[in-house]
Amino acid sequence: MRRLIDLVPTLFLVSLLVFGLMRVRGDDPVVIMLGPDATSQLVAEVRKELGLDLPLPVQYTRWMWGILRGDLGRSLRTRERIIDMIAERAPTTTYIAFTAIAFATLLGLLTGFYSALRRNSAVDQGIMVAAILGLSVPSYLMALLLILALGVHWRLFPIAAFSVDLWGEPLIAMRNLVMPTLSLGVGYAGLTARLARSSLLEVLGADYIRTARGKGLSHWQVMYKHALRNGIIPVITIATINFVHLMAGAIIIEEIFGLPGIGALLIRSIFMRDFPVVQGVTLILSLVCMLGSLVSDIIYTLADPRIRYQ
């Protein structure tokens, strides 16, 4: 409960920051929206209609009052409700983030644990080199390499301008998710593999593992009941945090593959100076990040009962 209450002042500060930054540039969104040929009278009328002629504190108060009532406002460009725009695009971003983190966690765990069990062998060194390479390649560069190889050269997957409708067209959606998932997931898989390896090695060197072996437990009993269970806890935590980061950070990948997600909406709104949309999307993504951090702490506590938060 205390952690939930702490979210309120943090969100308030985020809202102030976002509201202020969107007005630092000084660009008039009404002039940009109406074009250079619009008369000053028309610009003034539209600005008054949208409430942009009011003092900034009044605009901020109105915006916050709307948020408290569940209304993020409307787009300056399309006049659509911002909450509807976000809700329409949220499934695409969620699918990408979920498939990427599932791929990264599964691959990272398998390779990381296998590498720890084969410590200092050629396989161990090969896996760690591959993990570092995966971490070193930016997701946008990985996306371009995949497009060239799998999309252009072998034509296995579509390269852009597609949607992700898992409920309506599941097979097509899964095929469309392959390259975005790999683009985002490879780097996180490398990170997870290194974390899983170091975590398992630390557990295997603990006193209670030696005690378990001294009691005569078999190798697999020690591994299954003690080592793997404790070694996976840091991976669970980092996977939860990474999922939240992917929700907020899949912006470039959505743009590259033409996916209609929240990140693509944010980028286009920034270029069009549609600041009510930018404010709303940024605030929602900030809330998702904070809630994700809270969920991560809860999962960590459930996975390891020794941990309790005051």
Image (cartoon, rainbow, N blue to C red):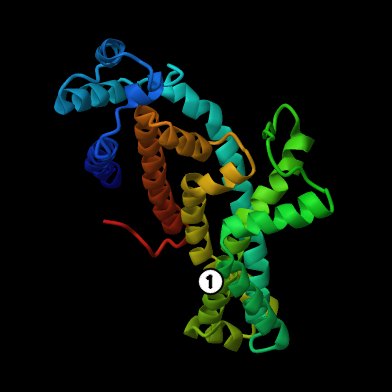
Residue under numbered circle 1: 195
Q: Position of residue 307 (x, y in %)?
A: 37, 62
Answer yes or no: is residue 75 visible.
no
Answer yes or no: is residue 91 visible.
yes
At x 64% / y 86%, what residue is drawn? 119
Q: Quadrant of residue 291?
A: top left
Q: Which quadrant of the rendered structure holds the N terminus?
A: top left
Q: Position of residue 158 (x, y in %)?
A: 76, 42
Q: Quadrant of residue 142?
A: bottom right
Q: Position of residue 84 (x, y in %)?
A: 47, 22
- In this image, 310 relative to 253: left or right? left
* Closer to the camera in the image, 131 or 7: 131
* Closer to the camera in the image, 191 or 295: 191
In the structure shown, which secondary structural element does the residue marked by tag 1 occupy?
Answer: helix
* Closer to the camera in the image, 262 or 154: 154
Q: Is residue 67 above or below residue 107?
A: above
At x 40% / y 46%, what residue is drawn? 289
Q: Is residue 76 above or below residue 224?
A: above
Question: How dense is the environment of label 1, judged by Cα within 10 Å: few (below 14), some, or many (20 and up)?
Answer: many
> In the image as oriented, which residue stretches furthest toward the front?
37
Q: Is residue 267 above or below residue 203?
A: above
Q: Position of residue 81 (x, y in %)?
A: 43, 19
At x 58% / y 57%, what residue is drawn? 139
At x 74% / y 55%, what residue is drawn? 148
- In this image, 28 relative to 120: left or right? left
- In this image, 236 relative to 296: left or right? right
* Kind of residue at badge 1: Leu
